[in-house]
Image (cartoon, rainbow, N blue to C red):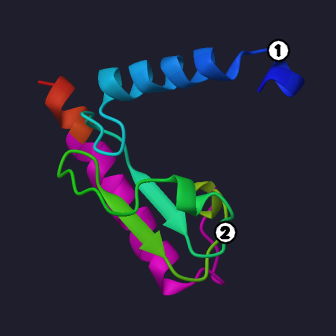
Amino acid sequence: CIDAYGIDPEAADFQTEQTNVLYGGNEPRISNVFYANGSIDPWHPLSNLSFDNPESPRVYMTGTSHCQDMYATTEDDVPPLAATRDLQLQSMKAWIQEWVP
């Protein structure tokens, strides 16, 4: 941190701990977040892979890469990707219904 950003490591550790306390660390206290993780996404180990929160679903998609769930649907989509997009749409519709009378 100090070499790249000029941030003292102790200050960074303290700020990280404070953020984890505020937001729940590995058990985030959030809602309306959809965790879509692809098996060939290099970032998936940093995501929520084990914490279950019914208000923030998580999906692990075999054979997909980073942000692939955000692209337009194609006929070449693997089944886990297509199923994830359907679940994302259902989740978003439910979240919007909470706000729309």
Give the position of the C terminus as an image quadrant.
top left
* Magenta residues, start to end: 71-94
Kindly state the secondary structure of the residue where label 1 is placed: loop
Q: Front-most of 79 and 26?
A: 26
Q: Front-most of 22 and 68?
A: 22
Say which quarter of the image contains residue 51: bottom left
Which amino acid, mark 1?
Gly
Mark 1 or mark 2, which is nearer the start of the sequence?
1
Q: Front-most of 81 and 101?
A: 81
Q: Does the segment drawn in magenta span residue 96? A: no
Task: Identify residue for label 2.
Answer: 65
Which amino acid, mark 2?
Ser
Check the image and name the residue furthest to the front: 10
Task: Identify residue for label 1.
Answer: 6
Question: Is residue 82 left or right of 90 when viewed as pictured?
Answer: right
Give the position of the N terminus as an image quadrant.
top right
Q: Position of residue 65 (x, y in %)?
A: 66, 69
